[in-house]
Image: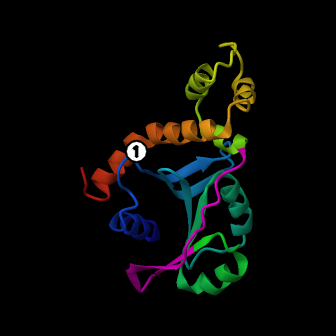
Amino acid sequence: MMKRVLIDWLAEHKMLVGDTVLISEMVVDSWSGRVDVAVVNGFLHAYEVKSAADSLVRLPNQLVRMRRMFDQVTVVCAPTHLNSARALLPKDIGIMTVDSEAPQQLAQRRRAKVMPVSDQDALISFIRRADLEAMLMQAGIEYDQTSFVDEIRSLARRVAIRDVRRFALQSLKVRYADRWLWLQQNLLGRA
């Protein structure tokens, strides 16, 4: 329910326009983690949802991963977690609350700051092999097509981070476009 309220809020506030893609339950970091909601446009924004029934115990470790892999991170929590979240979260992490008694009301308590991803390996991890190969070809970097993906990723580190970022954003948008279209049609009632 909280995730649906968040998605509706993002749509209402025109944060899901143009070629923006929303990804629900995005697997990250070689399947070692999951982001509740990710929004990919010119930035990578992760939203972690914590209901009143959830604990905040794992949140610090989740945030370490998210801050390494996303430009912006926002925690969407029940009001019961607000004081703990404010005390626990670094100032660059956004905070939103959804009240279970008035679920349509989402309040932005603190706006997330943009902290561009500087970990090139994190950006590379978002790019599928075929896109990595295209990026290497565009950069004029030779590779062996029989190479393992780890070797391709290693070569990708030679590409300027701004180009890796551009490929990562485009790769995610293309990979999740069909899922996002399905969500728009079935969840948001848009075509």
Residue 8, image quadrant: bottom left
Bounds of the magenta segment: 95-119
Q: Residue under circle 1?
A: 179
Q: Give the answer, above or below, for where 190 lies relative to 29.
A: below
Q: Is residue 140 left or right of residue 44?
A: right
Q: In the image, is residue 73 part of the stretch drawn in magenta? A: no
The picture places residue 153, in percent across and down from the top left corner, at 71, 30
Q: Residue at x 68, y 35 (%)?
A: 160
Q: Residue at x 40, y 61 (%)?
A: 15
The picture places residue 148, in percent across and down from the top left corner, at 71, 21
Residue 136, image quadrant: top right
Q: Residue at x 73, y 26 (%)?
A: 155
Q: Residue at x 53, y 53 (%)?
A: 43
Q: As rendered, which of 124 and 118 lies closer to the eye? A: 118
Q: Where's the N terminus, which quadrant?
A: bottom left
Q: As rendered, which of 132 and 33 lies closer to the eye? A: 132
Q: Amino acid at mark 1?
A: Arg
Q: Is residue 16 left or right of residue 159?
A: left
The picture places residue 67, in percent across and down from the top left corner, at 68, 59
Q: Residues within 10 Å of mark 1 (few under 14, many from 20)?
A: some
Which coloring applies here? rainbow
The picture places residue 187, in percent across and down from the top left corner, at 32, 58
Q: Give the answer, above or below, for where 137 lies relative to 154.
A: above
Q: Is residue 185 left or right of residue 143?
A: left
Q: Give the answer, above or below, for where 62 lies relative to 177.
A: below
Q: As rendered, which of 24 and 138 lies closer to the eye? A: 138
Q: In the image, is residue 106 part of the stretch drawn in magenta? A: yes
